[in-house]
Image: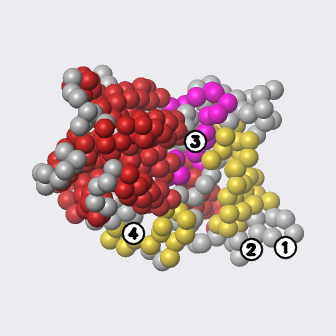
Amino acid sequence: MAILSYIIWNASPEIFSFGSFALRWYGLFFALGFLISQQILYYMYRKEGKPEKDVDTITIYMVVATILGARLGHVLFYQPEIIWTDPLGIFLPFEFHPFRFTGLQGLASHGGAIGILLAMWLYSRKKKPGQSYLQVLDRIVILVALTGALIRLGNYFNSEIIGKPTDKPWGVVFTGRLTEALNDKRIDTDGIVDDVAYIKNDTLPKGTNGRVPMTIYIFFKPTANELQINRLLDGEVRTLLTAQLDEFFDHESAMHLDYLIAKPDKDGFVAKINTMGIARHPAQLYESFSCVILFLVLLMIWMKYKENLVPGRIFGIFLIVLWPMRFLFEFLKENQESFEDTLPMNMGQILSIPLILAGIIILIMSFRKKAS
């Protein structure tokens, strides 16, 4: 028997919440990417004898460009209907009905890349010594690789940008969305859910295409009664498992929800639900790990050459490594929007091609130049 059959990932996307505001792991990793990158850029500028105050200016350019570019890129490339159906939702980080902080829902890495390219072009127009457009990009992309690794780690905590089903032993069943839903007062209107746990059910055979048997335990508060519990299980829980969360669970909609309620002494009721989870490629971790490796390689190249680096060399390497990796990883990921199912390649692959071609051209040009 294999030591590892699949992994159940039930981490909360939230670190803590206060009223309608919640600090999420994704936001923390996103911010850490900029904070750590800024410190590394300080180090690089000190080593090259460049003004450290320029790092503060570049950081502002980067933060604004990344957020605006990534958000607009998602809207234009994946959800253009938002422009006329919910124009305020493009940049407002909260919902009104009911009011709650959500953050920006949907950021596209290709849009962020375009934003960064434009921002660094604007910055390079200041004509500062040793900071031409390509020279700045050579340093910035090292940090982009690190930030990209952290952002993909945030996607993993959010259970988003998921991979396709797999029977590999490292396949991941993302259960966090169900836990998050059951902790939502709009789902659990009576406020009776206390905790949710998941275990592998080795008594049943595995299915195909990533289908794995598992048991869900829902623990209820001592004040909950059977009427409230049955209403929640036969209503919201059934809808979640059979329809709303069908990316994570394979529970036949025509099948009666298979559950058993027990009440241990002095404790509340416990519902036991047998279902099938869907183990998927942890594509977010594949990309995160690859970005860490790319970051280390690019940093070593910079450390070897520093100010003697041929302009465009690191930038070109970055483009011909990162975006082909992204192109290939897309084969292991689910499409983000349904319209992509009709395309010969998904949107992530289509948008990667121009950046790959640009990398080839820039790298060739860098080999024709002399060191600055």
Between discs 1 and 3, the one toward the N terminus: 3
Mark 4–mark 2 Cα distance, whole angstroms, equals: 31 Å
Mark closest to the chain's N terminus, 1 or 2: 2
Which stretch is magenta?
156-175
Q: CA distance from mark 4 to mark 3?
A: 27 Å
Residue 46 on the magenta span: no
Q: Assess disc 4: are there few (<14), some (14-19) or many (≥20) residues with their C-alpha within 10 Å of its C-alpha.
A: some
Q: Which residue in the structure is indicated by mark 3?
A: 249
The reply to whether callout 3 and callout 2 are in contact (CB within 8 Å) is no
Residue 220 x, y percent position in the rendering: 70, 66
User: Circle 1 is placed at which residue position?
Assistant: 266
Amino acid at circle 1: Lys
Q: Are marks 4 and 2 in contact (CB under 8 Å)?
A: no
Q: The residue under label 3 is which amino acid type?
A: Phe
Instruction: Describe the element under mark 4 as helix, strand or loop.
Output: strand
Q: Is residue 177 above or below residue 247?
A: below
Residue at 55% across, 33% down: 281
Judging by the rendered image, the residue that carries numbered circle 2 is 222
Task: Say which of 228 and 88 sits in front.
Answer: 88
Dot placed on the residue nearer the N-terminal end, 1 or 4: 4
Looking at the image, which residue is at 50% across and 31% down?
164
Query: In percent of the image, x 37 and y 37: which residue is there?
Result: 305
